[in-house]
Every structure is written in C-alpha cells, then in structure tokens.
Image (cartoon, rainbow, N blue to C red):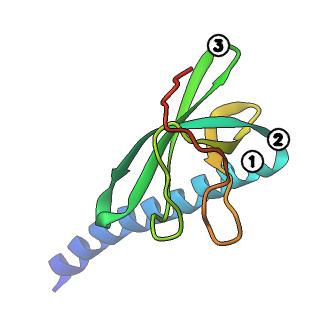
Amino acid sequence: MKKQLITLVCILVPLIGFVIYGFWYTNQEDRLLKEEPVYSTAIIVETYVGTKVRNFVRFEFSISDKIYDGHQQYFPKIENIEVGDTCEVVYAKSNPEINRLLTNDDKSLKVKRRSKEFAPF
C-alpha cells in the first residue's frame, strides 16, 4: 500500500507542476499582449489539421526585416481561410515570438485581404 502511494505521488506532483506552469505561461503571454501590444499584418502560409482533428493556420509577419511566425486554431465551418490571405496580428513589443491573430466575436480570424496568390515576404 505504501509503495502504491509513493508511486501515485511521484506521478501526480510533476503532473500538477506541469499544469500550473502551463497556466502561468499562458497568463504571462496574455499579460504581455495587453501591456505592450503592437499590431501588424500577417500572411497565412499554411493550413493544416493538428491534434484531435483541429484546424490550424501557420502565419508569418515581418518586423525590421526579421520574419516571425505563429500557429493558431481556426474554424473552417465559420470561415474559409486560404494560403495567401492576410490577417491582423498582435505581438508583444518586447518579444514578438508572443503573438496571436486577432479574431472577431464569432472566433473567426480578422481577415484583411483574401488572395489567391501566395506572396511571401
């Protein structure tokens, strides 16, 4: 019985720590995006199906000749997103690696321009 309890504790403690870290990291990103937002335009460079059959886009945006990218879930039942579409993106001024595409109230992406032609930076 004691061995089972020790095994259970050894499994639960790291798991709880991982969950707490995940919440802390997400809150840090949200805080930075609220405190120091910078808005720009991103181009969709890929659409793909991720885990649990969720649809994602990969996007890129440029700051001072450096290209940053991000990934975000989208909902194809609400909108049709294609490679080459441009969307609004917000990033943290101190760390552009922290970024998100802006969404409408229905969680659809804020598309600025739809394009059939893919034009990378």
Residue 98's quadrant in the figure? top right
Tell me the kind of residue under disc 1: Leu
Q: Residues within 10 Å of mark 2 (few under 14, many from 20)?
A: few
For the point 56% across and 41% down, which residue is it?
85
Element type where label 3 sits in the image: loop
Question: Camera-side residue: 37 or 75?
Answer: 75
Element type where label 1 sits in the image: helix
Give the tally of numbered discs.
3
Tell me the kind of residue under disc 2: Glu
Give the number of the mark in front: 3 or 1: 3
- Identify the disc placed on residue 15: none
Is residue 79 found left or right of 105 in the rendered image?
Answer: left
For the point 62% across and 67% down, which residue is it?
107
13 versus 64 height, above or below: below
7 versus 119 height, above or below: below
Determine contact: label 2, label 1, CB under 8 Å.
yes
Which quadrant, please, contains the C terminus?
A: top right
Residue farthest to the top, as pictured:
65
Is residue 92 found left or right of 24 in the rendered image?
Answer: right
Q: Which residue is mark 3?
A: 65
- Identify the disc placed on residue 36: 2
Is residue 69 found left or right of 65 in the rendered image?
Answer: left
Q: Residues within 10 Å of mark 1 (few under 14, many from 20)?
A: many
> Residue 76 location, x and y as percent?
45, 64
- Real-space CA distance between mark 3 and mark 1, rounded to the nearest whole angstrom: 22 Å
Tell me the kind of residue under disc 3: Asp
Residue 51's quadrant in the figure? bottom left
- Real-space CA distance between mark 2 and mark 3, rounded to the nearest whole angstrom: 21 Å
> Residue 41 location, x and y as percent?
69, 36
Q: Which residue is mark 1?
A: 33
Residue farthest to the front, as pictured:
116
